[in-house]
Amino acid sequence: MRKSDTDKIIYTQLIIARMGEKELMNWWNTDIAYELGGADFLKRLLGDTLAPLAAGEGILKAAQLKESQSIKDIPNKQQVYSLFSPEPEINVAINERLRHFKRYPEDIPEEISQILDPKKDWQYEELVALLSTESANNYTGTSFGKEIKKNPGDGMTELMSKLASLVSTNEKGNYVLSYYQG
């Protein structure tokens, strides 16, 4: 997987992860990326450079835990993939890229740095506007969430964008899993 594709996926995940924090949509019980939340503590602990990245990893983990609670109820769950629980090779690429950013913070793309800026007081509409225009108009509502079909021609970045577009339509305080089956 190309670094640029991995960066796009991380960017998309971080937009939704920031959106889900308590101050905005309250999908997960975190406020670690906000200056008045955990970001100030992380800054004192890790410094200006690594603190935003640590906050980003924290909100990504919170989102992943939320999704895993929903995925565990789906039959044949070993074939279920979502925005924060992607296919194994994508997950490996994301983790390797985040490790790279820890070692070489100057390589963090500007758009990812902006999402992780603890001083920025994001509004829901601003974050939605940052999402790709790739939307999943064709999904099936299930008792587990919103399921999209993976088309043979879909690239992973497009698939993640479609999942994010569905997640962004969730109501405040009510996270509905958007997923596809492999």
Image: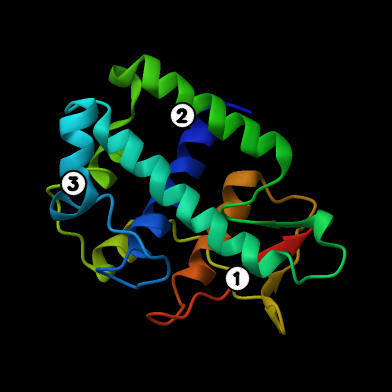
Residue 104, x across and y down, in percent: 35, 15
Instruction: Determine whether the residue tagged by mark 2 lies in a helix, strand or loop.
Output: helix
**Can residue 19 be seen in this snapshot?**
yes
Is the residue under label 2 in contact with that under label 1 (CB below 8 Å)? no
Residue that carries the numbered disc 3 in the rendered image: 118
Q: Tell me how far mark 2 sits from mark 3, CA to CA.
A: 18 Å
Residue 103, x across and y down, in percent: 38, 15
Residue that carries the numbered disc 1 in the rendered image: 177
How many numbered marks does the figure carry? 3
Residue that carries the numbered disc 2 in the rendered image: 98
Residue 19, x across and y down, in percent: 34, 63
Left or right side of 40 for 171: right
Q: Residue 140, located in which quarter of the rendered image?
A: bottom right
Q: Residue at x 55, y 25 (%)?
A: 96
Q: Nearer the viewer, residue 152 or 53?
A: 53
Q: Tell me how far mark 3 sits from mark 1, CA to CA.
A: 27 Å
Q: Residue at x 12, y 48 (%)?
A: 119
Q: Residue at x 28, y 58 (%)?
A: 31
